[in-house]
Image: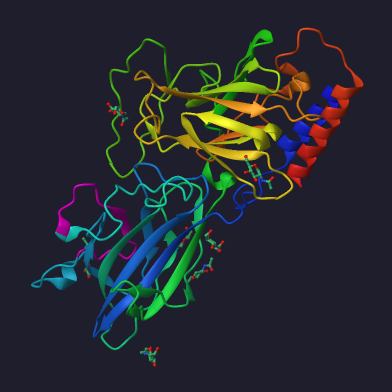
């Protein structure tokens, strides 16, 4: 009876379509692109553009952001510091003068690389377009650059462009809206200046826009069962189907197709497995003490061409509210709804395990955590000890079906356990709506 309920809840959970652009675990999450008009002279305008990643657990990984827009008139970018346009475009109408930085109607702007000469830098620039989430590193979730723009005719005012993009799959951006002017201080707060105008562009992530296929899967095991539940077959793709490509274990791909454009992400190339996912998260119920229990989490990189830097893992499990200790990962509860305290975020420790290296080079990171057994809630029955949901870098991982979970050696259905199963199903329903 309990198992059936769990199964129904899971099926329901899988049927609920991901709502467009809304993440219940990060309802406020957005990337804000702020345009500050610093100065306007006849025909030219100085602008400062800041990109802030206001997301709890989604970060921007290499090759980084690539900001795009569409100019309203025939504006050109005369100069830029702290970033650069990827194309200069057709500047032939400026023959005989110093050429602008970019004459593109729809320029694409990328960050500079670390180590750029000082005269081309601005504050918060030059990290190759990489931004951490707000939670991970408060000093690395914003970027900014400045540019001087030539406006169409000398007498007209600067007009904001439109059709903004951040160059990362899954994000869609609003048009610019004017907001109260940003204030800047030059003397530790003793004098404030302000922008002549400030506009915000809000970009929001949507799983449905990002990618039709999952990028990670979950496998399970426990001390009380010999069964290791593997990732479901074809979680991320099926071996041998047209369009799939994988490299057999032991084989070194001789011709690693190097992407021509360094501002584009390389096409993923994974090891041949039954699940074909680039990332596998393994949850092992390791030990049971009188009042505590211990879980080991291992993440394995099966992508041959990618290091996952600043990775994040979001886990939903009702016992996370009684987390006692996490070894070698960082943890922060994501309590978006006061009464449900079952979701938390894990990320790596800087210089130790914040990079999930490419397959073949120690391509895994692991951690253990100690949880207190909540009386009346905790049980090893009915798969309760396994996570309800896991996402890696903000993408949901495929879970094995609950009827395959490792079972306790003597399966007896006591009243207590079915009560807890009903409670668990209720929790799931709560989370869903
Ligand atoms: C974007 O995120 C910031 C920081 O969390 C928040 O203050 C702001 O309201 C968000 N904007 C939108 C439009 O959601
Ligand atoms: C460049 O732009 C000029 C007009 O500004 C146009 O006449 C010319 O054909 C363009 N050249 C190319 C290669 O597109
Ligand atoms: C430019 O802006 C000023 C003030 O915002 C306004 O008074 C003026 O009419 C504008 N000029 C044009 C050409 O739009
Ligand atoms: C603006 O973006 C939309 C969707 O990306 C595109 O269809 C449209 O052509 C773009 N408009 C301009 C003027 O570039
Ligand atoms: C943004 O502005 C452009 C031009 O001003 C307009 O064509 C487009 O429909 C607007 N897009 C949205 C999403 O409002
Ligand atoms: C991943 O990191 C390792 C060690 O730092 C490096 O040797 C390797 O080239 C990196 N791989 C990629 C695809 O960046
Ligand atoms: C949720 O759990 C964390 C510890 O994991 C605790 O610090 C926090 O107070 C809890 N919040 C609520 C609303 O119970």
Q: Nearer the viewer, residue 311 or 72?
A: 311
The quarter of the rendering in which ligand 2 is drawn is bottom left
Q: Which residues are magenta?
A: 101-118
Residue lying furthest left:
96
Whether residue 33 is visible to the viewer of this picture, yes or no, is yes
Taking the image as shown, residue 56 lies to the left or right of residue 128, namely right
- Residue drawn where x is 42% and y is 52% of the image: 138
State the image coordinates of residue 102 (x, y, percent, origin top left). 23, 63
Q: Main secondary structure of the magenta part?
A: loop
The one nearer the camera, 247 or 64, is: 64
Q: Quadrant of residue 317?
A: top right
Quarter of the image for the N terminus: give it.
Answer: top right
The correct choice, above or below, for 150 with respect to 157 in the image is above
Q: Quadrant of residue 154?
A: bottom left
Which residue does the image show at 28% across and 21% down from the upper left? 255
Q: Is residue 330 above or below residue 378?
A: below
Instruction: Give the residue drawn at x 32%, y 65%.
Output: 105
């Amino acid at each position: 009876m309990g198992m059936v309920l769990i199964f129904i809840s899971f099926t329901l959970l899988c049927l609920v379509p991901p709502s467009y652009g809304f993440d219940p675990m990060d309802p406020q999450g957005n990337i804000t692109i702020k345009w500050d008009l610093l100065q306007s002279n006849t025909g030219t305008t100085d602008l400062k553009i800041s990109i802030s990643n206001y997301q709890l657990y989604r970060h921007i990984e290499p090759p980084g952001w690539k900001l795009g827009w569409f100019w309203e008139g025939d504006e050109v970018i005369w100069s830029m510091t702290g970033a650069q346009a990827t194309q200069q475009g057709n500047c032939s109408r400026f023959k005989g003068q110093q050429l602008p930085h970019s004459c593109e109607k729809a320029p694409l702007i990328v960050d500079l690389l670390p180590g750029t000469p000082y005269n081309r830098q601005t504050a918060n620039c030059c990290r190759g377009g990489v931004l951490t989430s707000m939670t991970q590193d408060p000093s690395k979730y914003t970027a900014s650059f400045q540019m001087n723009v030539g406006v169409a005719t000398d007498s007209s005012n600067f007009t904001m462009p439109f059709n903004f993009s951040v160059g990362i799959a899954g994000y869609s951006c609003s048009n610019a809206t004017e907001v109260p002017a940003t204030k800047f201080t030059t003397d530790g707060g003793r004098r404030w200046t302000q922008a002549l105008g400030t506009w915000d562009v809000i970009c929001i992530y949507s799983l449905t826009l990002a990618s039709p296929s999952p990028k990670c899967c979950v496998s399970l095991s426990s001390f009380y069962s010999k069964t290791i539940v593997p990732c479901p077959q074809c979680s991320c793709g099926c071996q041998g189907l047209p369009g799939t490509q994988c490299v057999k274990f032991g084989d070194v791909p001789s011709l690693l197709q190097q992407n021509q454009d360094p501002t584009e992400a390389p096409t993923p190339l994974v090891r041949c497995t039954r699940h074909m996912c680039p990332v596998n998260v393994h949850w092992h119920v390791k030990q049971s003490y009188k009042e505590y229990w211990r879980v080991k989490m291992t993440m394995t990189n099966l992508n041959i061409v990618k290091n996952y830097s600043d990775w994040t893992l979001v886990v939903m499990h009702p016992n996370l509210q009684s987390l006692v200790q996490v070894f070698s990962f960082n943890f922060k509860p994501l309590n978006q709804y006061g009464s449900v305290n079952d979701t938390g975020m894990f990320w790596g420790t800087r210089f130790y395990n914040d990079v999930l290296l490419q397959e073949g080079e120690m391509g895994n990171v692991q951690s253990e955590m100690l949880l207190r057994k909540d009386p009346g809630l905790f049980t090893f029955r009915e798969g309760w000890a396994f996570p309800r949901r896991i996402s890696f870098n903000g993408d949901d991982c495929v879970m094995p079906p609950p009827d395959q979970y490792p079972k306790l050696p003597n399966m007896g259905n006591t009243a207590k356990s079915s009560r807890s199963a009903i409670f668990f199903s209720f929790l799931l329903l709560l989370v869903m709506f």
